[in-house]
Image: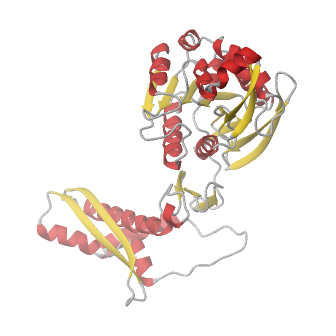
């Protein structure tokens, strides 16, 4: 994944600052992410969801609205209408650079802005909201007893999330001037609504109102125990997975990823998320690997030894399948559970493998399959040990390792009848 700074000019001539999170290959499409009220492009939800989508092939622009973060301007002068104009300006500047966004995402008030902006952006083919309010005037509840002062005096200092903001009467009037129901009903774009039933800032009834106002196709996904700001990595990761899977129905087909040198090489690259998270690319597939939370990781994927155990389990299953097919035995399914541990009295690592074979097999056939499991290529590699060659900046040129792996399995089947 690559992150680039992206600056552009807003509708009022102010300089707006953002970041593009890009996949390392050609993006499938581009998306715009609208952050929550008084947040910035660096909010946890914005960063985690944008990066997670980038790992799934979608380039995402997250930027600071006018008067927030590193962007110029005054938040109170801009208001909700200004957020909408900022999104439209961002879309235009992305299009000018050949990155026209087709997916719109918005969190909290940014979700409401995303809906309003989408109505004016014909290139957007799908929109998703997270913890978004139906009536943006709902935001005035955050001002508490300062609301009367703003109305009577024209402005007041309001503390929001520990940061003081000057809120003017025009800001309140702008919020109250927007009618979301009609805008949502006329979107004519697929809509995904994600919301937590435990949201204490924007209640779940807002999700119901948005969903009921929208035309089909529309979808609702509960974020279960998530808080309003989606502070838990598990919640943002889940949201990103759901958005990517849902949007794939409406987005362009993923272009073929550029092949790495050495067609069957496994490429591991840090993602920049958390302390240990890496992306693993192998055979056209991608997955995350990580360490558990209790040792400083995000817990977003299997650890190194779990991947090694998975290799042993996968090879075992494939070897038994190949042997049973060769013998024309009625093997229905193989299940392999692998555990890895160390014993103080044993200098080598211990892998414990439990194998379940299903099908109309007699006892002799079952026992024979268990014996064959000990002949799988990865098992043999672990038992005899290997040599690891490390080179600076070099890529493996060994010929067709995957093909050789299956030749090893075929050899096992031939050797043992």
Q: Residue furthest right?
A: 13
In this rendering, position of residue 254 left or right of residue 39:
left
Q: Residue at x 58, y 79 (%)?
A: 388
Outermost residue toward the left?
Answer: 362
- In the image: residue 197, left or right of residue 180: left
- Image coordinates of residue 414 in percent, x first then y, are 32, 72
Query: Residue 142 appears at what percent x and percent y?
Result: 61, 28
Q: Nearer the viewer, residue 75 or 236?
A: 75
Query: Which quadrant of the view contains residue 64?
Result: top right
Q: Residue at x 49, y 27 (%)?
A: 193
Along the line of sight, the residue nearer the viewer: 370 or 403: 370
Residue 402 in sight from this viewpoint = yes
Foreground of the two, 377 or 40:
40
Q: Quadrant of the C terminus?
A: bottom left
- For the point 46% across and 34% down, the residue is 196
Q: Percent position (x, y) of residue 205?
A: 45, 23
Task: List x then y, in percent, for residue 179.
Answer: 60, 11
Q: Is residue 412 above or below residue 169?
A: below
Q: Relative to residue 86, is residue 47 drawn left or right?
A: left
* Relative to 106, residue 376 above or below: below
With respect to residue 356, does 98 lie above or below?
A: above
């Amino acid at each position: 994944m690559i992150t680039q700074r992206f600056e552009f000019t807003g509708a009022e001539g102010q300089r707006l600052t953002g970041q593009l999170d890009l996949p390392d290959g050609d993006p499938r499409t581009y998306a715009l992410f609208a952050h929550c009220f008084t947040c910035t492009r660096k909010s946890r939800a914005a960063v985690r969801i944008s990066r997670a989508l980038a790992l799934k092939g979608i380039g995402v622009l997250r930027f600071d609205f006018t008067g927030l973060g590193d962007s110029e301007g005054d938040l109170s002068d801009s208001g909700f209408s200004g957020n909408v104009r900022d999104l439209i300006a961002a879309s235009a500047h992305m299009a000018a650079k050949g990155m026209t966004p087709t997916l719109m995402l918005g969190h909290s008030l940014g979700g409401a802005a995303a809906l309003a902006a989408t109505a004016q952006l014909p290139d957007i083919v799908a929109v998703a909201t997270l913890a978004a309010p139906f009536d943006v005037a709902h935001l005035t509840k955050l001002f508490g007893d300062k609301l009367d002062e703003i109305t009577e005096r024209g402005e007041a200092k309001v503390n929001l999330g520990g940061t003081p903001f000057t809120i003017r009467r025009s800001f309140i009037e702008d919020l109250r001037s927007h009618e979301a129901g009609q805008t949502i009903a006329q979107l004519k774009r697929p809509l995904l609504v994600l919301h937590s039933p435990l949201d204490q800032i924007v209640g779940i009834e807002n999700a119901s109102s948005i969903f009921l106002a929208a035309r089909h196709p529309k979808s609702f996904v509960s974020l279960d125990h998530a808080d309003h700001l989606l502070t838990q990595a598990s919640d943002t990761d889940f949201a990103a997975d759901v958005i990517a899977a849902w949007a794939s129905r409406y987005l362009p087909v993923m272009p073929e990823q550029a092949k790495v040198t050495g067609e069957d090489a496994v490429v591991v690259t840090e993602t920049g998320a958390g302390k240990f998270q890496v992306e693993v690319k192998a055979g056209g597939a991608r997955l995350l690997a990580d360490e558990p939370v209790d040792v400083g990781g995000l817990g977003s994927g299997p650890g190194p030894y779990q991947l090694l155990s998975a290799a042993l389990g996968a090879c075992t299953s494939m070897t038994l399948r190949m042997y049973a097919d060769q013998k024309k035995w009625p093997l229905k399914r193989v299940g392999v559970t692998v555990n890895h541990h160390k014993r103080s009295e044993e200098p080598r690592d211990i892998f414990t493998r439990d194998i379940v074979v299903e099908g109309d097999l007699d006892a002799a056939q079952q026992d024979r399959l268990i014996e064959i499991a000990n002949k799988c290529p990865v098992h043999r590699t672990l038992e005899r040990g290997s040599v690891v060659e490390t080179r600076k900046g070099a890529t493996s040129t060994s010929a067709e390792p995957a093909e050789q792996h299956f030749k090893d399995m075929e050899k096992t089947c031939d050797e043992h009848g």
